[in-house]
Image (cartoon, grey):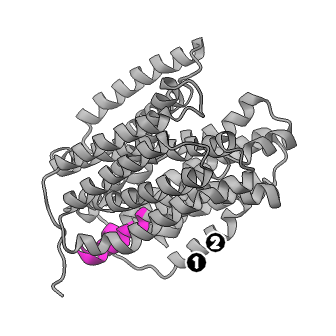
Amino acid sequence: MASVAQLLIVLDVSVVNVALPSIQADLDLTDLAVSWVALVYTLGFAGVLLVGARLGDVLGPIRALRWGIAGFTLASLAAGLTADPLLLIAARAAQGLSAAIASPATFALLTVTFPEGRERVRAIAWWTAASLAGGGIGNVLSGVLTQWLTWRAVFLIAIPIGALVLLGTRRLRPPEPSGRTRISVIGAVLVTAGFTLATYVLSTIGDLNRDWWGALVAAVVVIGAAIAHQIRAAEPLLPPSLWRNPTIVIGNAATFIAGMSFQVAIWYFLTFLLQHGLGLAPAMTGLAFLPLTVTLLAVNTWITPRLIARHTLRSIAVTGALIASTGLLLQAVIPTEQPYLVVLAPALIIGLGAGLFNTPLATLVTTGIGPAEAGAASGMMNTAKQFGGAVGLAIITTSITAPTDRTAFTVMAALTLTTAILIAAVPSQRPKHEQP
């Protein structure tokens, strides 16, 4: 259930991408309004992640997951049925806020349910596969549903999935974490406001107007105040023990850099390459993501856990990041006159590499975490991913001439190579395994 919930949450980041032109035409939205349909979900999600994660430590991961998915499902129903642009934007914001509560709870649920070792590695492999494949699956569904049904289906598809997760949680009975009874209201407000402003600035970095600069100044001030408060807080959102652990710190730095390529950017620029570079229709664009998505899922779910049983987490993750970097570089240089090669060859290499390094990395940053800090550790990792995605997209879009410029994939290759270097600096360790 945790992996299905995570798939639903990540899927909704990209599921509106191909549908946006149809939404704009049907509801007569301005360019600014339609951009907010996509942006407000990210603002709500990334801005509240750390607070949502700590809320999971207070409530317990099962209750937090139920609350988050229930809110997400209701917001999806509202988004799929409304004909009012403002209500659609509000519903997307509610989806993001609900996702910020549910997503950290999904990973925390794994860490408190499965002991360190083979079972946890398998569980994390499924969760990581859902997180990574969500972008590709969202693009597939967005194209197919928009072209063959209606754009409303991209929101309504969440209702049966959300109901399935809620029913599944009724059978879960893991121990609830203890040791934390409250969250500082001032700290929660400052951190949420700081991250929300930072996400807004990063998402609109190409529009250098007065409002953008005002938001940048506000973000710097609020984040500074949040850091100062957290240093003095009796119960900070991120416990000091996490910052003292070099594996967690370096591992999350690697997660941040990896997120710059794999959280948003790769799906964004592949969409432009397929639709504008190769001239594919929306449905075919969505289907063209299948080779990458299927390869990534297969490697991450079935091959990587077996390798982890025989090799160190660090060696597998470094190898995977190097392979993925090679695939991204190939995507940048392969001739577009060979459309099948453009779709298939890099996808197989990128999928192999990404499928190899993400589960070991997620396992590293949660090794040795106790139940009382499971939510915080999950929130730290999810925040690294989300802000890595926002920073990566901002950096790449400002360093290229157009979304179809394939230099973007060269930048992603360099970022993934940096990820490999960071992972190599993580203290080598092997998760606990039962003897065969």
Residue 148 in view, yes or no: yes
Distance between mark 1 and mark 2 Cα atoms? 6 Å
- Amino acid type at image mark 1: Leu
Name the residue rendered at 39%, 56% in the picture: 354
Q: Secondary structure at mark 2?
A: helix
Residue 183 in view, yes or no: no
Q: Is residue 338 one of those drawn in magenta? A: no
The image's mark for residue 124 is none
Name the residue rendered at 38%, 28% in the picture: 223
- Residue 105: quarter of image: bottom left
Q: Secondary structure at mark 1?
A: helix
The kind of secondary structure the magenta stretch mainly shows is helix
Tell me if mark 2 has few (under 14), some (14-19) or many (20+) residues whose alpha carbon lies within 10 angstroms of its own: few
Residue placed most toward the observer, 127 or 265: 265
The image's mark for residue 163 is 2
- Residue 85: quarter of image: top right
Image location of residue 363, percent across then percent down: 28, 62
The image's mark for residue 167 is 1
Image location of residue 92, percent across then percent down: 66, 46
What span is colored magenta in the figure? 109-128
